[in-house]
Amino acid sequence: MSQLFTPVRIGRLTLQNRLVMAPMTRSRSDDNGTPSDLVATYYSQRASAGLIITEGVFPSAMGKGYVRTPGIETDAQVAAWKKVTEAVHAKGGRIFMQLMHCGRISHPSLLPNDAQPVAPSALKPAGQTWTASGLQDFVTPRELSLEDIAGVIEDYRLATRRALAAGFDGVELHTASGYLPEQFLSSGSNQRQDQYGGSVENRARFVLEVLAAMVAEAGGDRVGIKISPEMGFNDITDANPQETYTYLVEQVRGLDLAYLHVALFGAKVDYHALLRPLFNGAYLIGGGLDQTGAEAVLADKRADATVFGGAFLSNPDLPERFRQGLPLNTPDKNTFYSPGAEGYTDYPFASGTNAN
Ligand SMILES: Cc1cc2nc3c(=O)[nH]c(=O)nc-3n(C[C@H](O)[C@H](O)[C@H](O)COP(=O)(O)O)c2cc1C
């Protein structure tokens, strides 16, 4: 008997199924970070997910890291997101916003007044990023002062408030993929000598303070966190990830969050076995799942819900396809981040339409 289509409680919500749409950057917003009307169509097409987690959204303009990504800072952005949440809710869906501050994984050309990106330490990441003028090397970031850090935490707090004003059911803190929260958490990118660097207690402080600010606005039962231990994306390294993530999750317990979302990509340790017993909310597993894998995870009670990225991107009606055992559309990488409807809102439904 499939567990995928049984309801599940996540924080304040009861989801209609255990299929969660993964946060995926799709770059269909304007240069001011305001989502286009296509964004509302795209998410509402996928409203049959138990829960949608949006693409990463910058809490403030200094958190932007990619062209045409959206924010939740201005009134225009809030108004555009409101259309998204209304469209999803009108179809009975549920939607959290993922808050993503890219920190040093950015470029002056993406930031206000060509500002230097910010980070816990002035360490330049290896690699390049897409800008309006093509691929460019990352630059050396500016080290955040203690006052700056308090300001960034305040940005997350206000972003949470605005996300709720825009009608979101909750917010997720992106603590993976080498962005600002993981830059603080990881020993390779954090060489601070103050209370935000050094020991694991100090490196985790930023993430825990950001979460506390989000919880103060939304309540723990409307806040989730995503982590990807050992992912290594965006030049992120940590000397002892088992210790780091064990400590983090133990501390997060006290915040009574709605969920812990763990996406693993080739980690050497079974972090699900390590972390799930430490956590007190719903546990979400993502990363490389197919239907069979998800059924097995749920049957073995290794997670409360399962998260799908590429499959949801290319199959707006993924739950229905799974329920009926129908074939899946294949995601087209060439249109992941391209402007416009192609590869965004034109993936067909199994019913032969792409009705929204
Ligand atoms: C096009 C694309 C964009 C993504 N953007 C984000 C993002 O903004 N935030 C995030 O946490 N993960 C992002 N991811 C990772 C997904 O959330 C997910 O962890 C990953 O796709 C693995 O799941 P899958 O194997 O089911 O696709 C992205 C993935 C894809 C394919």
Image (cartoon, rainbow, N blue to C red):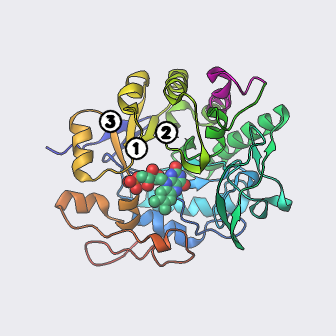
Q: Mark 2, residues whose alpha carbon is within 10 Å: few (<14), some, or many (≥20)?
A: many
Quadrant where the C terminus sits is bottom left
Amino acid identity at mark 1:
Gly
Q: Position of residue 258 (x, y in %)?
A: 47, 34
Q: How many callouts does the rendering have?
A: 3
- Residue at figure coordinates x 71%, y 56% from the top left: 138
Circles 2 and 3: CB atoms closer than 8 Å:
no
**Residue under label 2:** 230
> Which of the marked residues, 3 or 1, is nearer the chain's N terminus?
1
* Numbered disc 2: secondary structure: loop
Task: Judge whether 115 appears above or below 17 on screen.
Answer: below
Of 178 and 147, the residue lying toward us: 178
Circles 2 and 1: CB atoms closer than 8 Å:
yes
Amino acid identity at mark 3:
Ala
Residue 5 visible to an observer of this rendering = no
**Residue under label 3:** 303
Q: Where is residue 228 in the image (x, y as percent from the top left)?
A: 49, 41
Q: Position of residue 179 (x, y in %)?
A: 63, 46
- Per the model, the C-alpha gap separating discs 2 and 3 is 20 Å
Q: Which residue reaches farthest left? A: 1
- Residue at figure coordinates x 82%, y 31% from the top left: 146
**Residue under label 1:** 266
Q: Position of residue 262 (x, y in %)?
A: 44, 39
Residue 259 visible to an observer of this rendering = yes
- Left or right relative to 87: residue 134: right
